[in-house]
Image (cartoon, coloured by chain):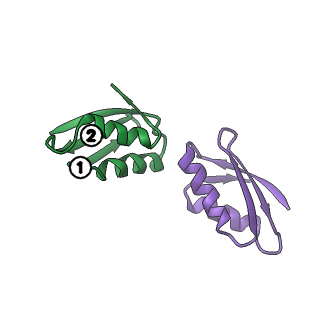
Chain colours: A purple, B green
């Protein structure tokens, strides 16, 4: 499965790393691409292991807002 | 001695930490305060151990520009 999350508040390369790192730590996530300027994050994942809610929590724990 | 450096490109708390951490690692630096919104960094240092050039390099190595 592939999903695009809209993430507010990412401003720099460190933000990109923080979000990417948090998602990659989740079981079931096997690909993350952050588009800083667009405020979007593409995630490849296995829906048997991880939910959107889980990914949203991981991003929000880093201090960013997920839209929707 | 105390000096204020003008630093461009700091956008978030991670940037603040990166700059603060890089300066604090330098011998002779014993106090760093980052003012993110103003783009300014106050440094307390001992001029016998560290130069402005050295501090500038440390900040630039993290990907930020120092003005002047």
Image location of residue A18, percent across then percent down: 57, 56
Q: Earlier in the sequence, mark 2 or mark 1?
A: 1
Q: Kindly give the residue lying farthest to the right in the view shown.
A: A1
Circle 1 chain? B
Q: Is residue B34 left or right of residue B1?
A: right
Name the foreground residue: A34 vs B26. B26
Q: Which of the 4 image quarters holds residue B19? A: top left
Q: Is residue A58 left or right of residue B62?
A: right
Mark sitting on residue B31 = 1
Relative vertical location of residue A59 with respect to residue B60 in this rendering, above or below: below
Q: Answer whether residue B41 is visible to the viewer in this image.
A: no
Residue indicated by mark 2:
B42
Image location of residue A1, percent across then percent down: 86, 62
Q: Kindly give the residue lying farthest to the top in the view shown.
A: B68
Q: Which of the 4 image quarters holds residue A46? A: bottom right
Q: Answer whether residue A41 is visible to the viewer in this image.
A: yes
Q: Residue at x 66, y 62 (%)?
A: A23
Q: Is residue B32 left or right of residue A18?
A: left
Please say if the residues under marks 2 and 1 sit with CB atoms less than 8 Å apart: yes
Image location of residue B37, percent across then percent down: 41, 37
Circle 2 chain? B
Give the secondary structure at mark 2: strand
Image location of residue B21, percent across then percent down: 36, 52
Q: Is residue A64 left or right of residue A55?
A: left
Give the secondary structure at mark 1: strand
Q: Quadrant of the N terminus of chain B?
A: top left
Q: Residue at x 61, y 56 (%)?
A: A19
* Alpha carbons under labels 2 and 1: distance apart: 8 Å
Relative vertical location of residue A39 with respect to residue A3 in this rendering, above or below: above
Mark sitting on residue B63 = none
Q: Residue at x 36, y 42 (%)?
A: B58
């Amino acid at each position: 499965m592939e999903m695009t999350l809209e993430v507010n508040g990412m401003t720099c390369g460190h933000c990109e790393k923080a979000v990417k790192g948090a998602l990659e730590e989740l079981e079931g996530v096997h690909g993350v691409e952050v588009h800083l300027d667009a405020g979007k994050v593409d995630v490849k994942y296995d829906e048997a292991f991880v939910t959107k809610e889980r990914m949203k929590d991981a991003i929000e724990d880093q201090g960013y807002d997920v839209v929707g």
